[in-house]
Image: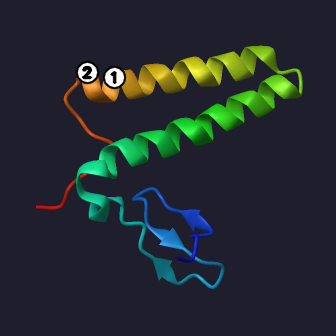
C-alpha cells in the first residue's frame, strides 16, 4: 500500500506527482468508522502532545478539547466521519 502525500477537502489523496490515490476506509466495512475515528484522534492527539511538548500548553489543551467536542458533536447529531456513497 502506498501512503498518500496529502488529502484535499474531500479526503481524496494525491501523491507527490499529483496522481489521485484512493483512501478507502469504506472498504473496511464495519471497521471503517472506528478506524477513521482512531486515525483522526491519533493525529489530533499527536499534534496536541507536540504543542504541549514545546511549551504551548494552552494551544495543546485547546486542540485536544476541540477535537473531543468535534467528534462528540458529530455522533450526537447522528452523523458519521465517513460519508457513504449511495
Q: Looking at the rendering, which quadrant does residue 6 occupy? A: bottom right
Q: Residues within 10 Å of mark 1 (few under 14, many from 20)?
A: few
Q: Which residue in the structure is indicated by mark 2?
A: 76
Q: Residue at x 45, y 56 (%)?
A: 9
| Disc 1 from disc 2: Cα separation | 5 Å
Q: Which mark is residue 63?
A: none
Q: Residue at x 36, y 66 (%)?
A: 24
Q: Which residue in the structure is indicated by mark 1?
A: 73
Find out whether the residues at labels 1 and 2 contact each other: C-beta distance under 8 Å.
yes
Instruction: Say left or right for 77 vs 36.
Output: left
- Toward the viewer: 64 or 28? 28
Q: Residues within 10 Å of mark 2 (few under 14, many from 20)?
A: few
Res 28 visible: yes
Relative to 22, is 76 above or below?
above
Residue 47 in the image: state x and y as whole percent.
Answer: 70, 36
Q: Secondary structure at mark 1?
A: helix
Q: Secondary structure at mark 2?
A: helix
Relative to 57, is 54 above or below?
below
Relative to 20, is 62 above or below?
above
Looking at the picture, the colour scheme in use is rainbow
Instruction: Say left or right for 77 vs 19.
Output: left
Q: Residue at x 68, y 36 (%)?
A: 46
Amino acid at each position: 500500500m502506498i501512503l498518500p502525500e496529502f488529502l484535499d477537502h474531500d479526503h481524496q489523496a494525491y501523491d507527490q506527482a499529483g496522481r489521485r490515490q484512493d483512501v478507502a476506509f469504506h472498504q473496511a466495512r464495519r471497521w471503517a468508522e472506528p478506524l477513521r475515528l482512531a486515525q483522526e484522534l491519533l493525529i489530533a492527539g499527536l499534534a496536541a502532545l507536540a504543542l504541549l511538548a514545546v511549551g504551548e500548553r494552552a494551544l495543546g489543551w485547546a486542540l485536544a478539547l476541540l477535537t473531543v467536542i468535534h467528534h462528540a458533536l458529530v455522533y450526537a447529531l447522528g452523523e458519521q466521519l465517513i460519508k457513504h456513497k449511495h
